[in-house]
Amino acid sequence: MNGRELKGNVRPEVARASYATDGTDFRGALKHHYVFALKRFAKYFAIFVPMIVLLFVTGIGYLVPLAVVGFIGLLITVIPFVSAVTWTWRCSRVFRTYPLSFRGPVKKLDSRSGGKLILCLGEEGIVGSLVLSAMDPLSRSGWPRGIADGVWFAGDDLFGGAAIVPGTGELLFMQPRAWKKLSESRKHADADRIERAR
């Protein structure tokens, strides 16, 4: 995909975040993502759990297919919830370890399903500007609005990091696209740098 094809792959309009997205406080973004994942889970939990409970409360055998549907639906709901909480927790660890700094512009290289993005912070080819794989903790597809202007990044380019998109407050968990190729560079990094990245 080239840059022209990616311009149309932007997420629908999202209301401006009700918390600071200027790099001064990452806690609001984390709280928002945790609450969003929990609300999405609770919405489906309220539908599928009664299907299961109904079988045991009434003891009526012909409700078994309904309980099976409820169980499968609950499983399908739990997987994205656990994924969203895990990715948000990883972003939280990065934000608590590294300071936020503004990095831009962001060059959009590719967008994949499941919230996976390929991008470059800064100008591609400049030392310190690696091509990164980014993951949206909530697995939303497309590019966050306003990402091209830059992001608030916390982390180490060699080991990865996390970012907050200004304006929308969306989180991205990132790691170098060429993870295997850079393994030798990571092994030879300073001991403090390696310890901090753990």
Image (cartoon, helix red, strand yellow):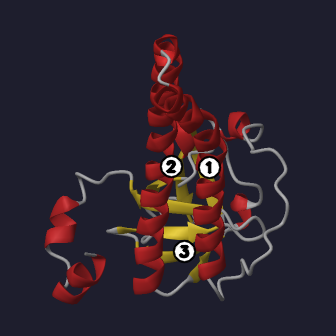
Give SS at disc 2: helix
Q: Amino acid at mark 2?
A: Phe
Closer to the observer: label 2 or label 1? 1
Q: How many marks?
A: 3
Note whether 105 is above or below 21 in the view shown.
above
Note whether 3 is above or below 83 in the view shown.
above
Closer to the observer: label 3 or label 1? 1
According to the picture, the residue beneath numbered tag 1 turns out to be 42
Q: Amino acid at mark 1?
A: Ala
Closer to the observer: label 2 or label 3? 2
Q: Earlier in the sequence, mark 2 or mark 1?
A: 1
The Cα atoms of the two marked residues, 2 and 1, are separated by 10 Å
Mark yes or no: residue 113 visible: no
Q: Identify which residue is drawn at 46% across, 26% down.
A: 72
According to the picture, the residue beneath numbered tag 2 turns out to be 81
Give SS at disc 1: helix
Tell me, for residue 153, which label it has, or none.
3
Left or right position of 29 against 132: right
Front residue of this view, candidates 27 and 34:
34
Q: Residues within 10 Å of mark 3 (few under 14, many from 20)?
A: many
Q: Amino acid at mark 3?
A: Phe
Left or right position of 77 against 170: left
Q: Tell me where residue 117 appears, x and y as whole percent.
A: 54, 47
